[in-house]
Image: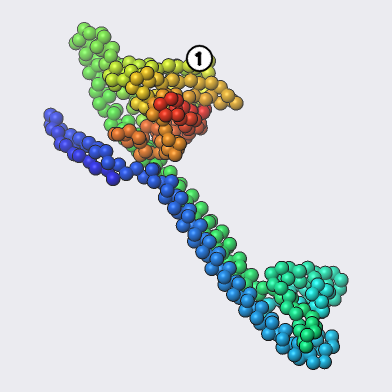
């Protein structure tokens, strides 16, 4: 839940809407893990319920098949008052024509099959190869269903081996087919929504950046004109120089926003000057921020990487600003170090702030997530976008120990 307080102010001829954010956020990222776990548990529950229900149906159908075979076995045995193998074969061929499941007859429990039907081997085939195939099928049948003896007057005349009907086999496979189909549907749906969401986020970022660059362009042009007027009218070089620096800064910001959404040109450049400029920029402003944080740099001046200077410096400044905000009020520090490893450049931004809980190591790069009282959660999200999408790199939390050492790493 986010509550807003709105004030209207009149400045000159313009009415300005000032929006204050009252900090009453319900951060969905704190609950996203629970929601995902809940959905997984529900999905597993549905799958298990389907499997159990289907297996119960299969079990009941097999019991019905067993009862039917037992009935036939008793009927055959009673019919064989004068037991002869030829008569037995005749009964097998003539009486059980209506049985819908595969069946094999043998004299002994594990002996050679005498007759069969509803299996893949022709019932008239009697070659050694055919017989061995039937024996293999008979063993598979016995694994699923115990063979039923043909008993008559305490004598066992033979055994009936039977398997599952096609309906039972299909029903047994049904839950697994459902799982595959549902999983495929969920996967396609997830990928579809993921790409739609990614496209929407891309459009929002690009639209916001382009509009910001456009809005900054008009007052920036006006300021540059007034700067020339001041040079002619005011004999204060130090003032004009400071104004020029701020105008250059605004121009740099405008260039950064204008490059969001376009594919930047990456040139092999030394990274030391860019990292140093980022620290120097905040060193001058720390007194204004009422912060006393020690800023240091440990980077080989010869390290180079393919970068877009405007965008890369923007990413570094965002990370340094976050580290400064997180650093301890007393004896706080922020350090940038860089080294080469396995053909990559690893850049670490280190601070001794309150740290980042491991459950939020990925969340901090998501738009809208912020641990600050009045944070919008866009800085690190934008930084990740610049590093991963525009520089083909990686950014992640390498380690975090509260009030001792937190390391965010960029890999180029």
Question: In the rendered image, is residue 103 in sight?
Answer: no
Q: Quadrant location of residue 277? A: top left
Give me the residue at 44% from left, 20% from top. 335
Left or right of 235, for residue 92: right
Q: Nearer the viewer, residue 74 or 211?
A: 74
Left or right of 173, for residue 89: right
Q: Say which element carries label 1.
A: loop
Q: Quadrant location of residue 126? A: bottom right
Q: Furthest-right residue in view?
A: 128
Left or right of 19, for residue 372: right
Position in image of residue 14 (x %, y %): 15, 33
Position in image of residue 218 (x %, y %): 26, 28
104 to 305, vertically: above or below: below
Give me the residue at 22% from left, 18% from top. 226
Colour theme: rainbow
Disc 1 target residue:
301
Question: In the rendered image, is residue 160 in sight?
Answer: yes
324 to 23, vertically: above or below: above
Q: On the rendered image, what quadrant is the N terminus found in?
A: top left
Give me the residue at 48% from left, 20% from top. 337
Give me the residue at 26% from left, 16% from top. 243
Position in image of residue 341 (x %, y %): 58, 24
Position in image of residue 114 (x %, y %): 82, 79
193 to 138, vertically: above or below: above
């Amino acid at each position: 839940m986010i509550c807003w307080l709105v004030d209207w102010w009149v400045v000159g001829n313009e009415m300005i809407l000032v929006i204050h954010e009252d900090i009453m956020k319900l951060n969905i990222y704190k609950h996203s893990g629970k929601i995902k776990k809940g959905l997984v548990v529900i999905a597993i529950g549905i799958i298990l319920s389907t499997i159990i229900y289907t297996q119960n149906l299969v079990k009941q159908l097999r019991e019905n098949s067993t009862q039917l075979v037992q009935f036939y076995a008793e009927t055959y045995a009673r019919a064989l008052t004068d037991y002869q193998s030829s008569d037995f074969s005749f009964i097998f061929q003539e009486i059980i024509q209506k049985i819908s499941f595969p069946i094999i007859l043998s004299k002994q429990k594990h002996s050679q099959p005498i007759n069969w039907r509803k299996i893949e081997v022709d019932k008239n085939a009697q070659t050694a190869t055919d017989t061995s195939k039937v024996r293999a099928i008979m063993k598979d049948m016995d694994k699923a269903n115990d063979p039923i003896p043909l008993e008559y007057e305490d004598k066992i005349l033979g055994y009936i081996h039977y398997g599952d009907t096609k309906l039972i086999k299909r029903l047994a496979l049904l839950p697994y087919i459902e799982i595959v189909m549902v999983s495929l549907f969920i996967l396609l749906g997830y990928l579809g929504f993921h790409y739609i969401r990614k496209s929407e986020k891309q459009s929002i970022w690009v639209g916001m950046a382009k509009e910001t660059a456009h809005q900054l362009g008009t007052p920036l042009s006006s300021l540059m004109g007034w700067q020339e007027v001041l040079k002619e009218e005011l004999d204060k070089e130090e003032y004009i120089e400071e104004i020029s620096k701020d105008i250059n800064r605004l121009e740099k910001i405008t260039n950064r926003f204008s490059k969001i959404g376009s594919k930047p040109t990456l040139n092999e450049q030394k990274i030391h000057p860019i990292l140093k400029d980022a620290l120097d920029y905040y060193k001058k402003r720390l007194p204004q921020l009422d912060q006393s944080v020690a800023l240091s740099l440990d980077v080989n001046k010869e390290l180079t990487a393919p970068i877009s200077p405007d965008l890369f410096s923007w990413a570094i400044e965002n990370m340094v600003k976050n580290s400064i905000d997180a650093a301890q009020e007393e004896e706080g520090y922020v350090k940038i170090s860089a080294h080469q490893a396995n053909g990559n450049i690893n850049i670490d931004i280190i601070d001794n702030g309150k740290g980042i809980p491991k459950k939020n190591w990925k969340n901090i790069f998501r738009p809208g997530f912020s641990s600050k009282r009045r944070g919008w959660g866009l800085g690190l999200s934008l930084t990740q976008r610049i590093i991963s999408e525009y520089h083909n790199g990686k950014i992640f939390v390498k380690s975090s120990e509260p009030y001792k050492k937190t390391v965010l790493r960029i890999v180029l």
